[in-house]
Amino acid sequence: RAGNSSTAMARVHEQVPLTVSVVGCGRMGCAIAGEFVRRGCMVQLYDQTEYTRTRALQTVRAFLYDHVANGYLLKMDVEELIGRIVLVHSLPEALEKAELVVESVYEDLQVKKDLFNAMGEIYKQRAIPADQESTHPIEIRLFGKRPSRREW
């Protein structure tokens, strides 16, 4: 958005035709969702825990208002950005329309394996998994097994 020099940094990108699903609505997942909506994407948020899912929009809103306080975002844009986020209630629903999926679940290897196995069952050959954390090697998370070179 155009603005005077005092608001030059406070920008919201025009909406782009990209739907991102963030799986995991904790602090990191909500921060990631906030960054994607600021850059024009539609975001679907999913968490298997209803409590965490229920408070996700409040958490994203808090992150966006932090950007307002730091001069990176205009207050009047916060609700427009929140409007680009949809809470979904199941993993299949989160993956159905997503063009990009970001995993942001609790740092527990078994939780991550279970999630990637479930995603693998839903996606089969449709997608390549990506992850925002690097404490566990991706080949361990890759649908629960390390692919052979022939599977690449």
Image (cartoon, rainbow, N blue to C red):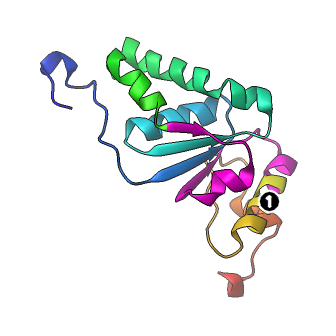
Foreground residue among 19 and 110: 19
Residue 136 visible, this orientation? no
Residue at 82% x, 56% y is 113
Most extreme residue toward the top is 69
Foreground residue among 8 and 78: 78
Quarter-of-image position of residue 67? top left
On the picture, is 116 further left or further right than 37? right
**Residue 14 image offset from top left, x and y in percent:** 29, 41
Q: Amino acid at mark 1?
A: Ala
Residue at 70% x, 60% y is 138
Most extreme residue toward the right is 110
**Residue 144 image offset from top left, x and y in percent:** 82, 64
On the picture, is 121 further left or further right than 71? right
**Residue 99 image offset from top left, x and y in percent:** 52, 59
Magenta residue check for 87: yes
Residue behind mark 1: 118
Circle 1: is it few (<14), some (14-19), or many (20+) Cα within 10 Å? some
**Residue 87 image offset from top left, x and y in percent:** 63, 37
Residue at 78% x, 67% y is 121
Quarter-of-image position of residue 30? top right
Magenta residue check for 145: no
Q: Can you say whether 55 is above or below 44 in the image?
A: above
Foreground residue among 47 and 71: 47
Residue 15 visible, this orientation? yes
Q: Is disc 1 placed on a helix, strand or loop?
A: helix
Instruction: Point out the stretch of residues depicted in magenta.
Output: 85-113
Residue at 87% x, 50% y is 110
Quarter-of-image position of residue 107? top right
Q: Can you say whether 104 is above or below 91 in the image?
A: above
